[in-house]
Image (tube, helix red, strand yellow):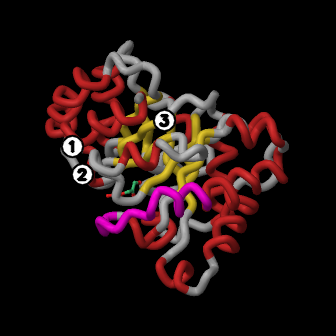
Amino acid sequence: MRKPFVAGNWKMNKTVEQAKALVAEILPGIQSIDSVERVFCPPATSLPTLSELLKDSGVGLGAQNMHWEASGAYTGELSAGMVKEFCQYVILGHSERRAYFAETDGTVNKKTKAALAAGLTPIVCVGETLDENKANLTAEVIKRQIHQGLAEMSPEQASKIVVAYEPVWAIGTGLAATAPEANTVIKSYIRDTMKEMFGAGVAEGVRILYGGSVTAANAAEFFSQPDIDGALVGGACSKPDFIQIVKAAAA
Ligand code: 13P
């Protein structure tokens, strides 16, 4: 049985004061729903404050990125050890980082290994662009992202990863994939690829999320699919929507 997982990716939104206010609004609505693993991923500036606020709440905290090196001359970056001071999770390979900040399957691979070594749970994002989707390259792109992003890992390491399928064309567009469409990619291109790489036990146990225009209105349909274990939520991270999405995952 895979425990449902709902994470909010706040992206580059909210000052510390605004982040505190949002947590204060959402937390009472989701705190008791412990059948779902719930995670907030605010900007790095809010991590110290929110880690105090969320202590003993049962709700986890994640960063949105990190570097693979432990320390050194990497201006502007954070190491896994620094993230681990405040967080249990880290989003890696988000399509916005791939598109705007030169993230590649190779850097995702190094970051994922570094996160695991530090005891963080990596939320590894994969997804095809609109052009790749139109050119029928979805299977090829997703399998490559999984093969290369999760290369040279042991089944034990792989079992600790959460994967998020976020088709780039569905992010922030209001045009979500259909639930069966997302399930097919997750089952046939992600779970089955992980089965080839790490064995049936890992593939059956690993949580795979859908992300891309998930809302309070469509979440339940995604969660009714057999291979979709939760959601990575962007725009719907505000109070009523996020609470509804967590409730849908628990149902
Ligand atoms: P939206 O939910 O705004 O489409 O964003 C999804 C996303 O990128 C989460 O990481």
Q: Judging from the image, what secondary structure is the residue with disc 1 in?
A: loop
Q: Nearer the viewer, residue 117 or 215?
A: 215
Which badge, 2 or 1, is on the more N-terminal residue? 2
Q: Residues within 10 Å of mark 3 (few under 14, many from 20)?
A: many
Q: Position of residue 151 (x, y in %)?
A: 78, 55
* Residue receiving disc 2: 13
The mark found on residue 209 in the picture is none
* Residue receiving disc 3: 5
The Cα atoms of the two marked residues, 1 and 3, are separated by 17 Å
Q: Judging from the image, what secondary structure is the residue with disc 2 in?
A: loop
In the current view of this chain or complex, which residue is farthest to the top?
Answer: 56
* Magenta-tinted stretch: 172-184
The Cα atoms of the two marked residues, 2 and 1, are separated by 11 Å
Whether tag 1 and tag 3 are in contact, CB under 8 A, the answer is no
Residue 72 visible here: no
* Residue receiving disc 1: 238
Q: Residues within 10 Å of mark 1 (few under 14, many from 20)?
A: some
Which badge, 2 or 3, is on the more N-terminal residue? 3
The answer as to whether callout 3 falls within 8 Å of ligand 1 is no
Quadrant containing the C terminus is top left
The answer as to whether callout 2 falls within 8 Å of ligand 1 is no
Give the foreground label among 2 and 1: 1
Residue type at mark 2 is Asn
Q: Nearer the viewer, residue 57 or 249?
A: 249
Q: Is 62 placed left or right of 234 in the picture?
A: right
**Position of 83 relative to 75 (above/below):** above
Instruction: Identify the residue at horizontal 48%, vertical 50% (top origin).
Output: 65
Instruction: Identify the residue at horizontal 63%, vertical 79% (top origin).
Output: 137
Residue type at mark 3 is Phe
Whether tag 2 and tag 1 are in contact, CB under 8 A, the answer is no
